[in-house]
Amino acid sequence: MGALERPALIEGEPTDEGAWRHWLAGLRCHELSLEDWLPATARLVVVAPHPDDEILASGGLISTHVAQGGRVQIVAVTNGEASHNGTPAVNPDDLAYLRRHERWLGLRQLGLAQPSVVALALEDGRVQQRGADLLARLMPLLRPDDVVVSTWENDGHPDHDMTGQMVRRASVAIGCTHLAAPVWMWHWATPGDTRIPWLRLRAVPLSAEAGSRKQTALAAHRSQLGPRSADLGAVLGPAIVARAAWRTEYYFV
Ligand SMILES: [Zn+2]
């Protein structure tokens, strides 16, 4: 998740997680056929704005692909050093180090024995100002037969939005398949929200094992799961933790 410098869409209380589940059950969202969209021979590239986004967006998909013998490459846009801004006791460099370690532990829980992570180390909270740089650095990392996952470009967090936009542009230029995962959208949008392109949403059902690995992987991100100080709550509150337990992941195509 990370710093919220432009939190217009993601302030306040999250939309009730149970209300989403109830509504999504009636949506009859088309399922994404992994045989067609993510064959075991393809490389899955997950571009994550902050450590933990690869799990929130696609932890189940990563685990499923690894279990089939598929290759996974993580591209880390930032090191997440700004998640505790407003907590003077936490040094950003120390936090970045800790979060990289948490990411490594989390990816191990998804079944990656030796996680492969390319760290772009853009400044957390300022990806919006570095779009051209991000695009230039993504281009040499992608190949036409990759399947690339990013956050959705209208997710509501500026780092997530710019990451999604630049990954879409890079994917079009190179010719790879792009899946865009909503992460923050579930916080601010509401069931049936007319701002959301529901017809482009696809469901990926997760096996019990993939779902369980995703939850264990998220638990590795301890710095995000507990209160940051006496005044600041956890970055990952109960609603997002509950959503990470869903046995379905959703992607815009
Ligand atoms: Zn994030």
Image (spheres, rainbow, N blue to C red):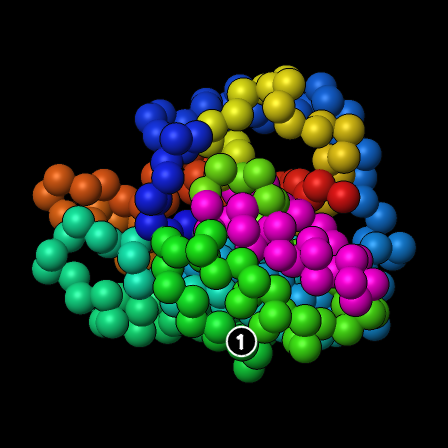
Task: Check the image and report above or below for 59 versus 235.
Answer: below
Front residue of this view, candidates 148 and 7: 7
Magenta stretch in the rendered image: 158-183
Residue at 48% in and 60% down: 130
**Count of numbered circles on the image:** 1
Residue 31, quarter of picture: top right
Q: Main SS type for the magenta part?
A: helix
The magenta stretch spans residue 9: no
Q: Residue at x 37, y 64 (%)?
A: 123
Q: Residues within 10 Å of mark 1 (few under 14, many from 20)?
A: some
Tell me the element at label 1: strand
Q: Is residue 177 above or below residue 93?
A: above
User: Badge 1 is on which residue?
Assistant: 117
Whether residue 31 can be seen here = yes
Seen from the viewer's position, the closer of residues 120 and 52 is: 120
The yes-or-no answer for disc 1 within 8 Å of ligand 1 is no
Q: What x and y, as percent, mark residue 78?
A: 43, 65
Q: Amino acid at mark 1?
A: Val
Residue visible at 60% across and 19% down?
Answer: 193
User: Where residue 156 sits: x, y (%)?
Assistant: 49, 37
Q: Nearer the viewer, residue 210 or 104?
A: 104
Q: Could you tell whether 84 is left or right of 28 in the image?
A: left
**Displayed quadrant of residue 22:** top right
Residue located 37% across and 59% down the image? 124
Give the x, y percent position of residue 14: 41, 27
